[in-house]
C-alpha cells in the first residue's frame, strides 16, 4: 500500500472540492429560482458564474500536479445541499424562505472557505506556488460571497422573515 503523504492528502482534498464545486454549480440555479428576494436571486446567479471560473481554476491546479481533474464524492456538500433542498421545500412561499436559503448558501460558503484555505496552505508547503495563487483567488471570491450574503441578510432578508408571525 502506498504511503499516505501530504501530497496524497492535497490531491484527495482537491478531488473533494472539485466534486463539491460541480454539485454547487448544479444547485445554484435551483436556489435562484426558489429565492423570493431579487437581491438573493442575483447573488445566486453571480455565484454560479464565479463557480464556473472556480472549476476552471481547479482544473488548472490538477494540471499543475499532473493529475486528471476528477472528483471524489463529498459527503459534506451532499449533506449541506440536501439541507438546502429541505428548507426550500418546507418553507416554500413562506416569509422565512429566503432567510433559510441564505443560511444554507452560507453553510456552503463556509465549507468552501475551509477547504480553499487549507489547500492554499498545503500548496505553499508543497512548493506549489502557482497552485497556491489559484486557490487564493478562489478563497478570496468565496470570502467575498459570504460577506455579500451577510449584507443581503442584514439589509432585508432577515427583516422580511420576521414579518410573518410564528405559527
Image (cartoon, rainbow, N blue to C red):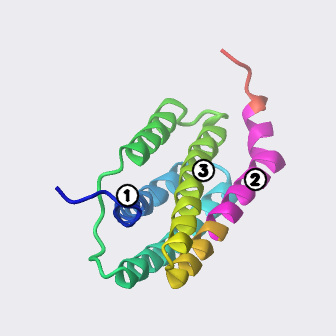
Q: Is residue 152 magenta?
A: yes
The residue at 73%/59% (across/down) is 148
Q: Is residue 39 visible?
A: yes
Measured from the top left, where is residue 68 in percent x and y? 26, 77
Q: Which residues are magenta?
A: 141-161
Residue under numbered circle 1: 16
Instruction: Look at mark 3 in the image and give the residue it sits on.
Output: 110
Name the secondary structure under disc 1: helix
Residue at x 40%, y 84% (from the top left corner): 64
Q: Mark 2, mark 1: which one is toward the viewer?
A: 1
Comparing marks 3 and 2, which lies closer to the viewer? 3
Q: Residue at x 54, y 56 (%)?
A: 112
Percent coordinates x, y for residue 155 in the rendering: 83, 50
Residue 160 magenta: yes
Q: Nearer the viewer, residue 4 or 48?
A: 4
Instruction: Quickly name the residue at label 2.
Output: 152
Is the residue 96 above or below the residue 165 in the image? below
Amino acid at each position: 500500500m502506498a504511503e499516505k503523504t501530504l501530497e496524497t492528502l492535497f490531491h484527495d482534498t482537491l478531488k473533494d472540492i472539485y466534486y463539491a464545486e460541480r454539485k454547487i454549480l448544479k444547485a445554484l440555479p435551483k436556489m435562484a429560482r426558489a429565492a423570493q428576494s431579487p437581491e438573493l436571486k442575483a447573488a445566486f446567479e453571480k455565484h454560479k458564474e464565479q463557480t464556473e471560473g472556480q472549476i476552471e481554476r481547479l482544473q488548472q491546479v490538477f494540471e499543475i500536479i499532473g493529475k486528471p481533474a476528477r472528483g471524489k464524492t463529498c459527503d459534506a456538500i451532499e449533506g449541506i445541499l440536501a439541507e438546502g433542498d429541505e428548507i426550500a421545500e418546507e418553507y416554500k412561499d413562506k416569509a422565512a424562505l429566503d432567510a433559510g436559503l441564505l443560511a444554507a448558501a452560507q453553510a456552503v460558503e463556509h465549507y468552501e472557505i475551509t477547504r480553499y484555505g487549507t489547500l492554499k496552505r498545503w500548496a505553499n508547503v508543497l512548493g506549489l506556488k502557482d497552485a497556491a495563487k489559484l486557490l487564493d483567488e478562489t478563497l478570496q471570491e468565496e470570502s467575498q460571497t459570504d460577506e455579500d450574503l451577510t449584507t443581503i441578510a442584514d439589509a432585508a432578508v432577515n427583516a422580511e422573515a420576521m414579518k410573518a408571525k410564528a405559527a
